[in-house]
Each structure stands twice: as C-alpha cells, then as structure tokens.
Image (cartoon, helix red, strand yellow):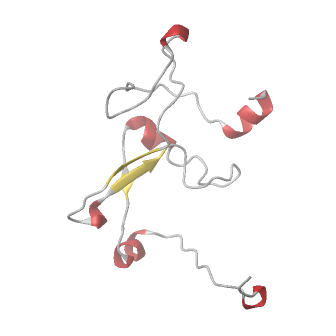
Amino acid sequence: MPGPVRWLFNEGPFDMPGGSAIVNANGWDASEGYEVTWGPSMRMVVDLSDLDGSTWVNQTGVSGHVTDDHYADQISDWVAGRQRPWPFSAKAVDETDPDVMTLRPDPAAGTG
C-alpha cells in the first residue's frame, strides 16, 4: 500500500496481545517476527436470553469515512479487550443512542 494511503487510513501502531488459536485472535507471520499483521474486524457476544445484553466492538470505529469523528473511535476499546453495549430492542436503542439517522424514501426517485 502506498505510503500516503497508509498514512490516511491506518491508525496506530498499537501493542496487541492475543494469538491465532485463542478467543483474543490476532495473528502474525513468525518468519517475519511477532508484529501483529491480521485480526478479526469485529468481536461480539450475543446474549440469546437477553438481546439487549449483547456486546460488540469494531476494530476501528463505526464509520468507514476517514474524516468522520467515528472512524477510529473504538480502537482503544479493541486494543484493551473491552466491548461496548449493543442494544437490540427499539426501547433500548432509544435509551442509549444519542445519534439517530432516519432514512426516508424520496418520492421523486420513483420505485426504479
């Protein structure tokens, strides 16, 4: 990856624990050293008895836009092994989420 692109999109570096055969999965190429070179894009625990009790964390942040405040807002939790609440029901989402996006169809666009 070209240097300017790497600088724009990559955060870090961060010291990472874990291994390729454990729950805290992170991997490396032993022939090149022990620097972490891959990991899962997200971690989640789904509580099937109480979906509102589920947790998750995204490797970077909730936005895929590099200039957005939420682009890298979960990295510190990811590195520390912390997860965030993942509310499921409409009530739980309304009680915990300060940001709301409402999608409305554009009548002028037609049904395509």
Extreme residue in the left direction: 49
Residue 49: x %, y % from top left: 20, 64
| Residue 63 as seen in the image, left or right of residue 46 | right
Residue at the image position 39 percent from the left and 78 percent from the top: 90
In the displayed structure, 110 sits above or below 73; it is: below
Residue 99: x %, y % from top left: 53, 70
| Residue 58 as seen in the image, left or right of residue 8 | left
Count of marks overlaid on the render: 0
Image quadrant holding the N terminus, namely top right
In the displayed structure, 63 sits above or below 23; it is: below
Image quadrant holding the C terminus, namely bottom right
For residue 109, what is the image quadrant? bottom right
Residue 91: x %, y % from top left: 35, 78
In the displayed structure, 74 sits above or below 96; it is: above
Name the residue nearer the viewer: 61 or 1. 1
Residue at the image position 63 percent from the left and 52 percent from the top: 64
Extreme residue in the front direction: 112
For residue 52, what is the image quadrant? bottom left
Name the residue nearer the viewer: 7 or 37. 37
| Residue 103 as seen in the image, left or right of residue 79 | right
For residue 96, what is the image quadrant? bottom left
Extreme residue in the bottom direction: 107
Residue at the image position 59 percent from the left and 54 percent from the top: 70
Residue at the image position 52 percent from the left and 28 percent from the top: 14
Residue 41: x %, y % from top left: 50, 42
| Residue 52 as seen in the image, left or right of residue 15 | left
